[in-house]
Amino acid sequence: MNRSLRTTLTTSTIALFSLFALLPFYIMLVMGTYQNEELFQKIVLVPGHYLMENIKTVAESRFDLAYMNSFIVSAASTVVSVFVSCFAGFAFAKHEFKYKKQIFSGVLLTMMIPGQLGLVAFVIEMRYIHVSSTLLPLILPWVANAFGIFWMTQFMKGAIPTEVLESARIDGCSDIGVFFRIVVAFIYPAIATLSLLVFLWSWNNYLLPLIIINKPELFTIPLAITSLGNAYRTDLAAQILGLTLGTIPVLILFIFGSKSFIRGLTAGSVKG
Amino acid sequence: MMDTAKRKWVPYFFLSPYLLFYMAFGLIPIIFSFYVSLTSWDGISGKKFVGLANYKFLFNGDSYFFKSIGNTLLFIVMTLPLQLIFGLLIATLLYSQYVKWRAFFQLINFLPYIVTPVAVGLMFNLLFDWQAGFVNKVLIHLGIIDEGIYWLGDPVYARLIIVLMMFWKGFGYTMIFFLAGLANIPKDLNEAAQVDGASGFRNFWSITLPLLRPVITFIVITGIIGGFQLLEEPMLLLGGAGMGSSSAVIGGPDRCCLTTVWNMYDTAYGSTTRYGLGAAIAYGLCVIIAVFSFIGVKFQKGEQE
């Protein structure tokens, strides 16, 4: 088989699969531009002209507030999670201390524990410390993120030359200084990848907000989408538009971040 | 190592934010949840200590505990191999030299993973809706069926749709990890084999696949852990537009799609507010995951030796 034929074959196989990946998105996009009744009558393949009206319906449900809440929660979760993970990862990857192995195994163990295990008591705890009517309960679980620590430890082991750290110390750099001036510079790819993942997971989180958030002003995007279904039970089209709108921010984030995301993944993740 | 004798506190300093937050918002709730699981409590009246009664109830036919575990396992067993095979296939094609627009296709196939699970559930609900659904309309239009199929009302179809949905959502994610794994394989290994006259297939089977084992293990273990957390997609698929209302069916037809976490949610915060039983379900799930992880780790170690 010659080269160009092979290229055509391979590329079209992948294109076919990509179509499978894209089709539901396309149908979702198109359905959001029709009037509700039309959705029941015909097969919609090209965009309709009811988009503005559907946008109005969605806007009435204060979708903008949900955007803001989701953004605050995801951004805060990402920052604290990445920061704490880098700190702990540095300790595990580049320091020696008593019971290091045991503590690290403990972290791995918590990775295996399903997130729902402490849920019942976590909700009670949040009520007890009087933060259950704020967004804080949605951020706190991400602070101690076992996956992030595992990720950073693995990455730092390979990415930071110990000699550089030692010479910085000999030159009189403090430990905090070493961390912020040197360590951070070596782990940008890992930071980018972890940030994108935590942002995504936090943005998409549904169970915890569903249980803990009961004020519509504090709804995050997933809650806002499902509540569109309740408020406009018959208006499928508006709900579909809500789905599209809720997905767009993370799509944009990944389209711009996909290069560094994949670089970080390739550089350090899955070496076993 | 660096001066550890002098500055013993340094590693603990870097660890302390994690340890403190984990204790406060991870460990304490987990321990307290265990205590709650030993009580009968609806959140309003006082807690009543009932010992292991909640755990005994899990074995009762009414609890749906084992049914929900069985459903969840079925979804994992059906979805994970599909994701592995197709993820690897697409990754291999994408990694070959015979492909155009690699970065573009890479991104497109990863997109489904990014979509909010709530949206995934609703999207497939719309596709397979009995009346307004895209699939039924296309099938009728093509003359394959005369009347819309009630996809989400039939246990077999409903389960198949969940598998299709999970596969759609996850194969791009496995593909990305396989791509990362392929990039970590030294190129000269494959080249050397080619020089020695190995065929492409042979090359893949004897060199690439064994070197991808860590990636496969990673995907399988995280896939099983993630699979046990399955909740939003089936919940929204089967609850659909009426989600949150009492009319939504819990777990789909015959509860064939009730997952363990859905069962826990419904027990503690949905149709009943039995916090104690909900916590017991979470602990039961944890034990089952622990067993699987243990087997997985043993299996992996056995293969390495």
Image (tube, coloured by chain):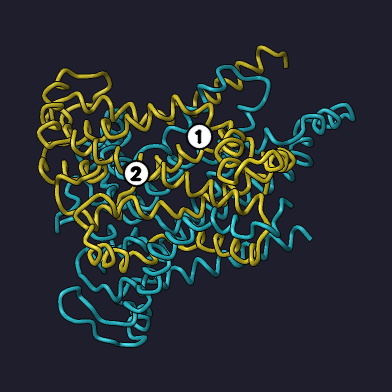
Chain colours: A yellow, B cyan
Distance between the alpha carbons at the discs numbered 2 and 1: 18 Å
User: Which label belongs to residue A136?
Assistant: none
Q: Residues within 10 Å of mark 2 (few under 14, many from 20)?
A: many
In this rendering, does residue B140 appear at all?
A: no
- For the N terminus of chain A, the quadrant is top right
Residue carrying label 1: A192
Residue A236 drawn above or below residue B104? below
Q: Is residue B38 left or right of residue A258?
A: left
- Of helix, strand and loop, which one carries label 1? helix
Residue at the spot 53% in from the left edge and 44% down from the top edge: B83
Name the foreground residue: A3 vs A229: A229
Amino acid type assigned to the residue bearing label 2 in the image: Asn
Rendered position, A159 above or below B216: above
Would residue A58 be visible to someone looking at this image? Answer: yes
- Dot 1 amino acid type: Ala
Circle 2 marks a residue in which chain?
Answer: A
| Residue nearer the viewer, A257 or B4 | B4
Which circle marks residue A204 in the picture? 2
Q: Position of residue A148 (x, y in %)?
A: 51, 48
Horizontal and vertical percent for residue A116? Answer: 37, 62
Q: Which dot, 2 or 1, sits closer to the camera?
A: 1
x, y (%) of residue B234? 33, 52
